[in-house]
Image (cartoon, rainbow, N blue to C red):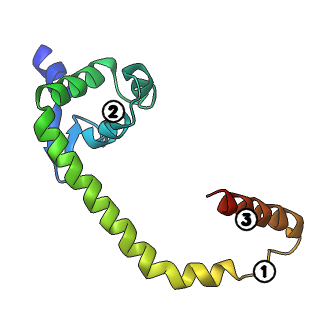
Amino acid sequence: MASVSNQQAGVNRTERGLVIAGTRITLYQLMDYLHAGHPLEMIRQHFPQITDEQFEAAMSYIEAKRAEVEAEYQIIVKEDEEIRRYWEEQNRERFAQIAKLPPPPGREAAWAKLQAQKAKLESES
């Protein structure tokens, strides 16, 4: 039974990259929190669907193979940014069209409040 438990708590490589065994949670998701400087307790709270054993196994794997995981993480971050920029460019015209639409009927007051908040945020940056 111990070997089954160890296997379930391990890290596997899938087409999605390094994942916590038995889940769809990637180590790159954990790395996002680590890079943001979150304490381990807080990171653990963001993933209630995994066991403490799975979390510890994932963190141990990251620590043991930090350079390898970090290199893969940087590739993932770069690819995500490229994809985001691509789709932002593809949708730029559509976003401009949507921004020019009038407020939905009955929501004019909320729309005005939203537009005022947007203007305030833009002036602050």
Pinpoint residue 6: horizontal percent, then vertical percent: 15, 21
Pinpoint residue 34: horizontal percent, then vertical percent: 33, 33
- Which residue was labeled with disc 2? 34
Marks 1, 3: nearer the viewer = 3
Residue visible at 85% across and 67% down in the picture: 107
Q: Is residue 33 above or below residue 104?
A: above
Nearer to us in this view, 70 or 20? 70
Q: Secondary structure at mark 1?
A: loop
Q: CA distance from mark 3 to mark 2?
A: 34 Å
Q: Quadrant of residue 33?
A: top left
- Which residue was labeled with disc 3? 119
Q: How many C-alpha atoms fall within 10 Å of the one at disc 2: few (<14), some, or many (≥20)?
A: few
Q: Is residue 121 above or below residue 49?
A: below
Residue visible at 33% across and 62% down in the picture: 81
- Which residue was labeled with disc 1? 102
Relative horizontal placement of residue 7, taking residue 110 as reference (left or right): left
Q: Cβ–Cβ below 8 Å for labels 1 and 3?
A: no
